[in-house]
Structures are given as C-alpha cells and as structure tokens.
Image: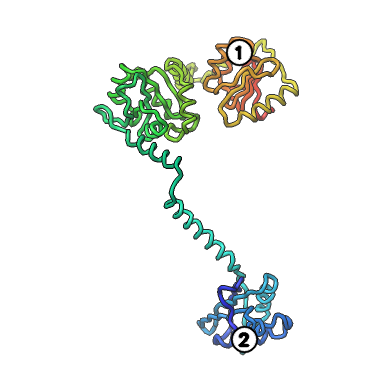
Amino acid sequence: MGKISPVSSKYIIHASIEIDGVVDRPDVIGAIFGQTEGLLGADLELRELQRSGRIGRIEVNVETRSGKTTGTIIIPSSLDKAETSIVAAALEVIQRIGPCNAKIRVQKIEDVRVTKRNFVIERAKQLLKGMMETVIPDSQEIADEVAYSVRVMEIQEYGKDRLPAGPAIDESDEIIIVEGRADVLNLLKHGFKNVIAMNGTSVPQTIVELSKKKVITAFVDGDRGGKLILKELFSSSEVDYVAVAPAGKEVEEITKKEIHKCLRGRVSAEQIKLELEKDTERIEKPLLYEKKQTHFQRQPPRTFSTRNMQKKTPTPTEKKRFREMLENLVGTRGANILDDKLNVLGKVPVSELQTTIKSLTSGVYAIVLDGVIDRDLVKTAEKAKVTFIVAMDSRIRGTDTNVCILTDSNL
C-alpha cells in the first residue's frame, strides 16, 4: 500500500470518532475502507487513492473508557479541494464499526500550504532583520549615525542642580529651556546646542540665575502640562519668549521642521501671561450667589448682548467655498483670512490668528480655521467687524454674537 509523503500533501482531514463499545484501531481502519468501498466511484476509491499516493496513511488514535471508545482520525491528501471534501464527507456515512454503533464527525480540513506559507513569512522576516543588522549602511546612514552619536555625547550636566544641557549654554546669549532630558536630546539631535532642561515642573535655582543674564525662550509641550510649566517659570524667573509644540505633541517627539516652525513662531512672554491670566479668570471666577431666606440662589452667567444684532446669511457659493477650505485645513492647525471676494489674504497658525486680526483691524470678511471658536476669538472678530467665522466646532452659541458662526456640522 502506497504512502503519501508529508511534503507533497496539500490538505489534512481531521475527524473525531465515538463508538458505543470496545473496538481496536484495525477495526476502525477496516470499517473506513470497507464501508466506503464503491460509494464514490472508481476514481475516488480509497484503496486505489492510497496505492497511487494521492491519499496518505490513515492515522487512527483510539482510547477506551467505561465501555466506550473515542478517538481521532487523520488523513493526509494531495487531491484538490473538492475531492478532499468528498472523501471527508464519506467518512461520516460510517455508522457501525464491528458490532458497535459509531459516529464519525469531520472537525476540519487543514490546508497545509497555509501553515507552510506562514512559516515562510515569519522566517523571511527573521532573515531580513538579520540582513539589515549586518548589511553595510550607505554613506548617508553612516553620516547620520555619527552626527547623532556626537550630538548625544555633547549632553552635559550644568550648574549646581546638575541639569541636562547642551554644550553652548555659557557662550550663548540666548538659551532654550525645555522640560526634561529627552527634550534636550531631541533638540541636540537637530543641531540646537543652547538647550537646558528644568528636570521637572519646579524651577531650579540654576534656571532662575540664567534668566537674569540670558535671553530666555521657554519651549513647552502642546498640552495642559506645558501651561503649568509656564506658570511656574513666570512666577520665579524672567522669561522673554515662549514657543509651544503642536497641540497634543511633546517637544521630545517633534521633527526638525516642527522645531524650527515653533521657534520661528515664538511669542513674547507678556502676551502668554495675559492669555494665561484670562484662562485662570474663566476657570477660577467665583460663582455669584445672592442670599434668599435660608438658601443661596446661583445667578446666571453673563452672555454677550444680543440686542440690535443683524447677521448676514452665507450664500450657497460662500458655504461651498467655506466647506472646501475647511476640508483642506483639517489637521494643519492653520487659519485662512478672507476678504469679501473670498480671496485668501493670508494663512497663519491658529495660535497667531488673534494677533494677526488685531493688526489688520479692517478688511477681514471671513475667517476659516482648523480649531474651535472661543470667546476671545469672537471678541477680536467683533472688533474687526468680521462677518463669518468658520471652524470645526464652537464653544460660543450663535445667539451670543453678531458674527455669523458656522461649524463643520452647519456646512
């Protein structure tokens, strides 16, 4: 009787067997050949398929407990999918083995090639990884690696607080203050050597002393933690400028292009102080209560006056233009300033939008921004007589201002 090579098999039939009685392995194999004989025609006769090597050795494993026999049947096949499925289904017609009732159920037909393919993929990954680790890098990779290593080696401990810093703190007239060592490493990697870290949220004495002698730029993360660090710096040291990483990002993870963009867009510390004070007033402003009999009654918050408001409704053309601009701005954290012909007067970061509007004073018809409309922006727009503000969302109700507010959902 022929035996199929495991290497040439394409499928493996897995079946379970339950027998109401005690039988041996040869009884099961005999039943498989005997009760399927002539059932599937000459082309799919199990004995002939085994002789030709298209069906492999039938493996039967049985176990007897409490007068009943259970086990598994495994049949390798090099037939095609349809023929293998027919052979598998034929096993389930067997109802008796020897004198006992039996039940065979095919559990699955395994495609051996899938297993081999997965092995090939995983092994190829390992080989590729090994090759990449040992292959000679190109000249640019060598140069980048050497430059990075040198810059990382340049990090030092500065002052009595032993703060992580670049090598050019003493000779530089301007220094950049960041939060931690990882931020210093990222800036060193991209060529900034006048960087020093606070090593936490509290301001070390070394930073305080440096702020009296140097021009200080505080470079903070674009999250709430960055604002907290700025408050600490403002309270104890003399900061001249503030640069902020893109919203939701940290200084240690931003790219060289983003670093340059943030530092070019730095603003004066006085402006940031005013903005932080406004934020604090909005958050910490006490609630107004008036005493009445035995309880206090909360007064409703003040809103913008809605008297004598006359708003312009956007035309279909304007809405279409606003929608296209807003879609193009998504993810850029930028803003377009438009005239009454819907021509773009300029594109600025959202962080610089209010300052730009104040400098223009007039001629601004609409603003389209990738951000959220807040009270400060609305006040600035009202003073500049802006007609439309278009943004992703708004914290201000349309009834609280005479500027027409449009959001993504309105468009």
List x then y, in percent, for residue 313: 72, 19
Q: Is residue 128 visible?
A: yes
Q: Quadrant of residue 399?
A: top right
Front-lying residue, 28 or 172: 172
Residue at 57%, 31% (x, y): give it.
Answer: 331
Q: Could you tell whether 291 is left or right of 88 in the image?
A: left
Residue at 65%, 79% (x, y): give it.
Answer: 91
Q: Is residue 295 visible?
A: no
Q: Where does the N terminus fall, quadrant-wise?
A: bottom right
Residue at 29%, 26% (x, y): give it.
Answer: 204
Q: Amino acid at mark 1?
A: Glu
List x then y, in percent, for residue 320: 72, 26
Front-lying residue, 386 or 210: 210
List x then y, in percent, for residue 284: 45, 21
List x then y, in percent, for residue 233: 36, 22
User: Hey, which residue is sitting farthest bottom in the picture?
Assistant: 99
User: Hey, which residue is sitting farthest front in the picture?
Assistant: 139
User: Residue at label 1?
Assistant: 382
Q: Which label's residue is closer to the chain start, 1 or 2?
A: 2
Q: Amino acid at mark 2?
A: Ile
Is 278 placed above or below 54 here?
A: above
User: Residue at label 2?
Assistant: 97
Q: Residues within 10 Å of mark 1 (few under 14, many from 20)?
A: some
Q: Secondary structure at mark 1?
A: helix
Q: Residues within 10 Å of mark 2 (few under 14, many from 20)?
A: many
